[in-house]
Amino acid sequence: MASGTSAGTGPSRHTLLVSRDAESSERRVWRDDAGRAPLRGLRVAANREKCLSLPCGGYSAVTTLDAFLQTIVEDPQSAGTTWLVLADWLEDQGDPRAELVRLLHQPDYRRDWPGERRDERVRELLASGVGPAAPTLVNSIGMNLVLIPSGVFLMGSPDGEGEDDEHPRHEVETTRPFFLGAYPVTQEEYQRVMGRNPSYFCATGWGKDGVKNLDTKRFPVESVSWDEAGEFCEALSKLPDEKEAGRTYRL
Protein backbone atom coordinates (compact mmCIF):
# COMPACT_ATOMS: atom_id res chain seq x y z
CA MET A 1 0.00 0.00 0.00
CA ALA A 2 1.55 3.27 -1.08
CA SER A 3 1.35 6.57 0.70
CA GLY A 4 2.81 9.93 -0.20
CA THR A 5 2.36 13.66 -0.37
CA SER A 6 3.07 16.27 -2.94
CA ALA A 7 2.49 20.00 -3.27
CA GLY A 8 -1.22 20.77 -3.11
CA THR A 9 -2.31 17.22 -2.29
CA GLY A 10 -2.93 15.37 0.94
CA PRO A 11 -1.63 11.98 1.97
CA SER A 12 -3.16 8.81 0.58
CA ARG A 13 -5.91 7.30 2.69
CA HIS A 14 -5.54 3.92 4.38
CA THR A 15 -8.07 1.70 6.07
CA LEU A 16 -7.43 -0.90 8.76
CA LEU A 17 -10.15 -3.50 8.88
CA VAL A 18 -10.61 -6.31 11.38
CA SER A 19 -12.02 -9.63 10.33
CA ARG A 20 -15.16 -10.61 12.25
CA ASP A 21 -15.16 -14.11 10.79
CA ALA A 22 -15.37 -16.77 13.47
CA GLU A 23 -12.64 -18.75 11.75
CA SER A 24 -10.28 -15.78 11.57
CA SER A 25 -11.17 -13.71 14.62
CA GLU A 26 -7.50 -13.17 15.36
CA ARG A 27 -6.59 -11.81 11.95
CA ARG A 28 -6.63 -8.14 11.08
CA VAL A 29 -6.69 -7.43 7.36
CA TRP A 30 -5.65 -4.41 5.32
CA ARG A 31 -8.00 -3.53 2.46
CA ASP A 32 -8.05 -0.48 0.28
CA ASP A 33 -10.83 2.10 0.52
CA ALA A 34 -12.79 0.44 -2.26
CA GLY A 35 -12.96 -2.78 -0.24
CA ARG A 36 -10.88 -4.79 -2.67
CA ALA A 37 -8.91 -7.89 -1.76
CA PRO A 38 -6.66 -7.80 1.33
CA LEU A 39 -3.33 -6.09 0.74
CA ARG A 40 -1.70 -7.30 3.91
CA GLY A 41 -2.56 -9.50 6.87
CA LEU A 42 -1.53 -8.70 10.45
CA ARG A 43 -1.41 -11.58 12.90
CA VAL A 44 -2.57 -9.92 16.10
CA ALA A 45 -5.24 -10.56 18.69
CA ALA A 46 -8.44 -8.80 17.67
CA ASN A 47 -9.68 -6.43 20.37
CA ARG A 48 -13.43 -6.72 20.01
CA GLU A 49 -14.25 -4.17 22.72
CA LYS A 50 -12.39 -1.43 20.85
CA CYS A 51 -13.77 -2.09 17.39
CA LEU A 52 -17.02 -1.08 15.75
CA SER A 53 -19.13 -4.23 15.59
CA LEU A 54 -20.53 -5.51 12.32
CA PRO A 55 -22.40 -8.76 11.59
CA CYS A 56 -20.32 -11.94 11.76
CA GLY A 57 -18.41 -12.47 8.57
CA GLY A 58 -18.12 -8.75 7.87
CA TYR A 59 -15.38 -6.29 8.79
CA SER A 60 -15.09 -3.43 11.23
CA ALA A 61 -12.76 -0.47 11.32
CA VAL A 62 -10.41 0.10 14.22
CA THR A 63 -11.87 3.23 15.73
CA THR A 64 -9.95 4.12 18.90
CA LEU A 65 -6.42 5.28 19.53
CA ASP A 66 -5.88 2.47 22.04
CA ALA A 67 -6.80 -0.12 19.40
CA PHE A 68 -4.26 1.28 16.93
CA LEU A 69 -1.52 1.42 19.55
CA GLN A 70 -2.29 -2.10 20.74
CA THR A 71 -2.01 -3.35 17.16
CA ILE A 72 1.45 -1.76 16.93
CA VAL A 73 2.49 -3.36 20.23
CA GLU A 74 1.32 -6.80 19.19
CA ASP A 75 2.84 -6.66 15.69
CA PRO A 76 5.69 -4.11 15.70
CA GLN A 77 7.20 -5.50 12.50
CA SER A 78 4.11 -4.27 10.60
CA ALA A 79 3.94 -0.99 12.51
CA GLY A 80 4.95 1.14 9.53
CA THR A 81 1.61 0.62 7.81
CA THR A 82 -0.38 0.90 11.02
CA TRP A 83 1.18 4.31 11.74
CA LEU A 84 -0.02 5.56 8.35
CA VAL A 85 -3.56 4.47 9.07
CA LEU A 86 -3.40 6.01 12.53
CA ALA A 87 -2.24 9.33 11.06
CA ASP A 88 -5.24 9.30 8.69
CA TRP A 89 -7.58 8.52 11.60
CA LEU A 90 -6.16 11.28 13.80
CA GLU A 91 -6.44 13.72 10.92
CA ASP A 92 -10.10 12.81 10.46
CA GLN A 93 -10.65 13.53 14.17
CA GLY A 94 -8.99 16.94 13.84
CA ASP A 95 -6.29 15.76 16.25
CA PRO A 96 -3.00 17.71 15.96
CA ARG A 97 -1.10 14.51 16.74
CA ALA A 98 -1.69 13.51 13.11
CA GLU A 99 1.12 15.80 11.99
CA LEU A 100 3.42 14.52 14.73
CA VAL A 101 2.77 10.90 13.74
CA ARG A 102 3.49 11.68 10.09
CA LEU A 103 6.72 13.51 10.90
CA LEU A 104 7.93 10.62 13.04
CA HIS A 105 6.69 7.63 11.07
CA GLN A 106 6.01 8.65 7.46
CA PRO A 107 9.35 9.24 5.70
CA ASP A 108 7.81 10.79 2.58
CA TYR A 109 5.72 13.34 4.50
CA ARG A 110 7.00 16.86 3.81
CA ARG A 111 9.76 15.41 1.69
CA ASP A 112 10.78 18.95 0.78
CA TRP A 113 11.97 19.52 4.35
CA PRO A 114 15.52 18.60 5.38
CA GLY A 115 15.92 16.41 8.44
CA GLU A 116 16.79 19.38 10.65
CA ARG A 117 13.53 21.14 9.74
CA ARG A 118 11.50 18.01 10.49
CA ASP A 119 13.19 17.66 13.88
CA GLU A 120 12.56 21.34 14.59
CA ARG A 121 8.87 20.95 13.79
CA VAL A 122 8.62 17.90 16.06
CA ARG A 123 10.10 19.95 18.91
CA GLU A 124 7.67 22.79 18.17
CA LEU A 125 4.68 20.46 18.36
CA LEU A 126 5.87 18.84 21.60
CA ALA A 127 6.61 22.24 23.17
CA SER A 128 3.11 23.44 22.26
CA GLY A 129 1.57 20.60 24.26
CA VAL A 130 0.93 18.08 21.49
CA GLY A 131 1.65 14.77 23.17
CA PRO A 132 3.05 11.77 21.30
CA ALA A 133 0.92 8.76 20.47
CA ALA A 134 3.07 6.16 22.19
CA PRO A 135 2.44 2.39 22.07
CA THR A 136 2.95 1.03 25.59
CA LEU A 137 2.60 -2.16 27.57
CA VAL A 138 2.59 -2.95 31.27
CA ASN A 139 4.63 -5.97 32.38
CA SER A 140 3.87 -8.43 35.14
CA ILE A 141 5.19 -6.21 37.96
CA GLY A 142 3.48 -3.06 36.71
CA MET A 143 6.35 -1.41 34.84
CA ASN A 144 5.29 0.82 31.93
CA LEU A 145 7.28 0.17 28.74
CA VAL A 146 7.19 2.28 25.56
CA LEU A 147 7.81 0.88 22.09
CA ILE A 148 10.89 2.37 20.39
CA PRO A 149 10.77 1.81 16.61
CA SER A 150 13.75 0.70 14.60
CA GLY A 151 15.65 3.44 12.83
CA VAL A 152 18.74 5.66 12.86
CA PHE A 153 19.70 8.19 15.51
CA LEU A 154 22.73 10.29 16.43
CA MET A 155 24.69 9.11 19.47
CA GLY A 156 27.06 11.46 21.25
CA SER A 157 27.39 15.20 21.73
CA PRO A 158 28.05 17.87 19.08
CA ASP A 159 31.55 19.30 18.88
CA GLY A 160 32.18 21.72 21.70
CA GLU A 161 29.64 20.07 24.01
CA GLY A 162 29.64 17.17 26.44
CA GLU A 163 32.41 15.03 27.90
CA ASP A 164 35.36 13.49 26.08
CA ASP A 165 33.77 10.03 26.04
CA GLU A 166 30.72 11.42 24.21
CA HIS A 167 32.70 11.99 21.00
CA PRO A 168 32.76 11.59 18.09
CA ARG A 169 29.06 11.99 17.38
CA HIS A 170 27.97 9.19 15.08
CA GLU A 171 24.95 7.50 13.57
CA VAL A 172 23.62 4.32 15.18
CA GLU A 173 21.02 2.08 13.56
CA THR A 174 18.60 -0.11 15.53
CA THR A 175 17.43 -2.84 13.19
CA ARG A 176 14.41 -3.96 15.17
CA PRO A 177 11.95 -2.29 17.56
CA PHE A 178 12.29 -2.70 21.32
CA PHE A 179 10.55 -1.61 24.51
CA LEU A 180 12.10 0.90 26.90
CA GLY A 181 11.08 1.64 30.47
CA ALA A 182 9.01 4.84 30.51
CA TYR A 183 10.08 5.75 34.05
CA PRO A 184 13.00 5.01 36.37
CA VAL A 185 12.73 1.69 38.22
CA THR A 186 10.93 2.32 41.50
CA GLN A 187 11.85 1.10 44.95
CA GLU A 188 8.72 -1.06 44.99
CA GLU A 189 9.58 -2.70 41.65
CA TYR A 190 13.19 -3.35 42.65
CA GLN A 191 12.19 -4.88 45.99
CA ARG A 192 9.54 -7.04 44.38
CA VAL A 193 12.12 -8.57 42.05
CA MET A 194 15.24 -8.59 44.25
CA GLY A 195 13.70 -8.94 47.70
CA ARG A 196 15.49 -5.88 49.11
CA ASN A 197 15.60 -2.10 48.80
CA PRO A 198 19.13 -0.60 48.73
CA SER A 199 17.92 3.02 48.52
CA TYR A 200 19.39 5.72 50.75
CA PHE A 201 16.06 7.54 50.81
CA CYS A 202 13.71 4.92 52.17
CA ALA A 203 12.32 3.88 55.56
CA THR A 204 15.29 1.58 56.22
CA GLY A 205 18.02 3.60 54.50
CA TRP A 206 20.60 5.98 55.90
CA GLY A 207 18.55 8.90 54.63
CA LYS A 208 15.34 7.81 56.33
CA ASP A 209 15.10 11.04 58.32
CA GLY A 210 14.78 12.96 55.06
CA VAL A 211 11.72 10.95 53.96
CA LYS A 212 10.05 10.53 57.34
CA ASN A 213 6.30 9.95 57.01
CA LEU A 214 6.64 9.62 53.23
CA ASP A 215 5.68 6.56 51.20
CA THR A 216 8.75 6.02 49.03
CA LYS A 217 7.63 2.92 47.16
CA ARG A 218 7.12 4.97 43.96
CA PHE A 219 10.42 6.85 44.41
CA PRO A 220 13.20 5.85 42.01
CA VAL A 221 15.46 3.18 43.45
CA GLU A 222 19.01 4.51 43.99
CA SER A 223 22.33 3.41 45.45
CA VAL A 224 22.39 0.64 42.84
CA SER A 225 25.64 -0.27 41.08
CA TRP A 226 25.93 -1.15 37.40
CA ASP A 227 26.37 -4.83 38.28
CA GLU A 228 23.32 -4.76 40.57
CA ALA A 229 21.26 -3.14 37.82
CA GLY A 230 22.31 -5.96 35.50
CA GLU A 231 21.30 -8.53 38.12
CA PHE A 232 17.91 -6.85 38.40
CA CYS A 233 17.40 -7.16 34.64
CA GLU A 234 18.41 -10.82 34.73
CA ALA A 235 16.09 -11.59 37.65
CA LEU A 236 13.18 -9.74 36.03
CA SER A 237 13.70 -11.71 32.82
CA LYS A 238 13.43 -14.96 34.78
CA LEU A 239 10.03 -14.21 36.34
CA PRO A 240 7.53 -16.81 35.08
CA ASP A 241 5.16 -14.30 33.47
CA GLU A 242 8.01 -12.48 31.74
CA LYS A 243 9.47 -15.75 30.42
CA GLU A 244 6.05 -16.78 29.15
CA ALA A 245 5.70 -13.42 27.36
CA GLY A 246 9.16 -13.88 25.81
CA ARG A 247 10.54 -10.64 27.27
CA THR A 248 14.26 -10.31 28.08
CA TYR A 249 15.53 -7.24 29.90
CA ARG A 250 18.93 -5.57 29.72
CA LEU A 251 20.57 -2.20 30.33
Image (cartoon, helix red, strand yellow):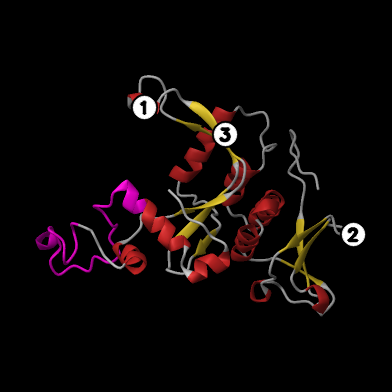
Q: Is residue 224 magenta?
A: yes
Amino acid type indicated by mark 1: Asp
Amino acid type indicated by mark 3: Arg
Judged from the image, the secondary structure of the residue bearing numbered disc 2 is loop
Judged from the image, the secondary structure of the residue bearing numbered disc 1 is helix
State the residue position of label 2: 37
Q: Quadrant of residue 159?
A: top left
Which residues are the magenta region? 200-229
Tell me how far mark 1 sits from mark 3, CA to CA: 28 Å
Between circles 3 and 2, the one closer to the viewer is 2
| Residue at the limit of the structure toward the right, as seen here | 36
Q: Is residue 96 visible?
A: no
User: What is the x, y in percent for residue 95?
Assistant: 59, 54
Considering depth in this image, is 191 or 110 the residue closer to the camera? 191
Considering depth in this image, is 69 or 127 the residue closer to the camera? 69
Left/right of residue 237 with respect to residue 203 in the rendered view: right
Query: Which circle's residue, 3 or 2, is located before the other in the chain?
Result: 2
Tell me how far mark 3 sits from mark 2, CA to CA: 35 Å
State the residue position of label 3: 118
State the residue position of label 1: 165
